Image (cartoon, grey):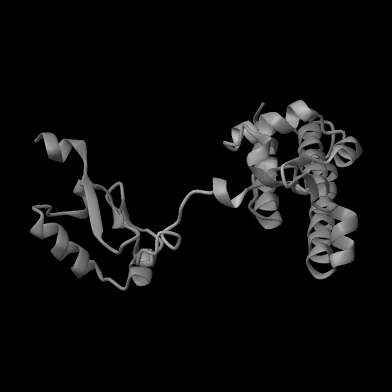
């Protein structure tokens, strides 16, 4: 039993490392070759995990071979447009100027009901409102609405708006994120001073704190502090 537990932990750790090396992507964003490699890796890990008679190395070596193959293919698709088209495919236009491309749907085995469902999910139930609908290489449908159907932007309304910044997390569950302090160009003393002005004496009393998109500091204290 202990052997099974140890083997499982080792394989789990190896899979985590391999998936991190291969990059951060959600399952729905994987290219076909990436999805195939991910499935094969999971199968290779499952066999030695279940059968203790199979040497652990027999599962680990193929996993690293597949990881190397995936990295190599990713590098090739990064450097070569032609190879990218062969390996990943090319985006396909399914709707152009409100007209469904029947031949393209047939070529991709993509039926009209699926197309209409995807459009409704994107918030466009009427095909005539769509300028372009493009099926991306990872299977996602990108919808470009007609100009008259696009939401008005500050530029359209000729409004001057302040450029937003990336929100920065400063404190999580009482722990100060020092790496983010450098990004925010603040020190621990600065945060302590701001909190003390609000009646908070310790970082441990703060559940969450950060800078919003406008650069303003905000925080939320923990429940036990609020209720005491």
* Residue at horizontal 85 percent and vertical 68 percent from the top: 80
State the residue in front, 209 or 63: 209
State the residue in front, 224 or 83: 83
Picture layout, residue 60 above or below residue 164 = above
Relative side of 61 to 198, left or right? right
Expressed as whole percent of the image width and height from the top left, the position of residue 21 reads: 68, 57
Picture layout, residue 63 above or below residue 158 = above
Q: Is residue 10 visible?
A: no
Q: Is residue 117 visible?
A: yes
Which quadrant is the N terminus positioned in? top right
Which quadrant is the C terminus positioned in? top left
Relative side of 101 to 226, left or right? right
* Residue at horizontal 24 percent and vertical 67 percent from the top: 188
Relative side of 193 to 108, left or right? left
State the residue in front, 26 or 190: 26
Res. 26 image quadrant: top right
Res. 210 image quadrant: bottom left
* Residue at horizontal 75 percent and vertical 26 percent from the top: 113
Expressed as whole percent of the image width and height from the top left, the position of residue 137 reads: 78, 49
Expressed as whole percent of the image width and height from the top left, the position of residue 213 reads: 35, 59
Res. 123 image quadrant: top right
Expressed as whole percent of the image width and height from the top left, the position of residue 221 reads: 20, 45
For the image, the number of numbered tags is 0
């Amino acid at each position: 039993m202990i052997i099974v537990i140890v083997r499982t932990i080792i394989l789990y750790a190896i899979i985590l490392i391999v998936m991190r090396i291969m990059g951060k992507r959600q399952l729905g964003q994987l290219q076909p070759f990436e999805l195939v490699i991910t499935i094969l890796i999971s199968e290779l890990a499952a066999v030695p995990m279940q059968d203790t008679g199979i040497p652990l190395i027999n599962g680990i070596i193929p996993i690293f071979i597949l990881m190397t193959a995936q990295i190599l293919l990713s590098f090739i698709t990064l450097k070569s447009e032609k190879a990218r088209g062969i390996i990943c495919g090319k985006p396909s236009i399914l709707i152009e100027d409100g007209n469904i491309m029947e031949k393209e749907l047939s070529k991709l085995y993509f039926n009209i009901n699926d197309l209409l469902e995807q459009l409704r999910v994107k918030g466009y139930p009427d095909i005539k409102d769509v300028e372009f609908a493009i099926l991306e290489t990872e299977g996602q449908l990108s919808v470009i609405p007609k100009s008259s159907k696009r939401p008005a932007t500050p530029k359209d309304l000729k409004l001057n708006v302040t450029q937003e910044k990336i929100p920065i997390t400063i404190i999580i569950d009482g722990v100060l994120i020092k790496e983010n302090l450098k990004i925010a160009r603040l020190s621990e003393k600065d945060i302590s001073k701001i909190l003390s002005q609000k009646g908070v004496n310790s970082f441990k009393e703060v559940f969450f704190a950060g800078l919003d998109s406008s650069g303003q500091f905000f925080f939320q204290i923990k429940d036990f502090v609020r209720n005491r």
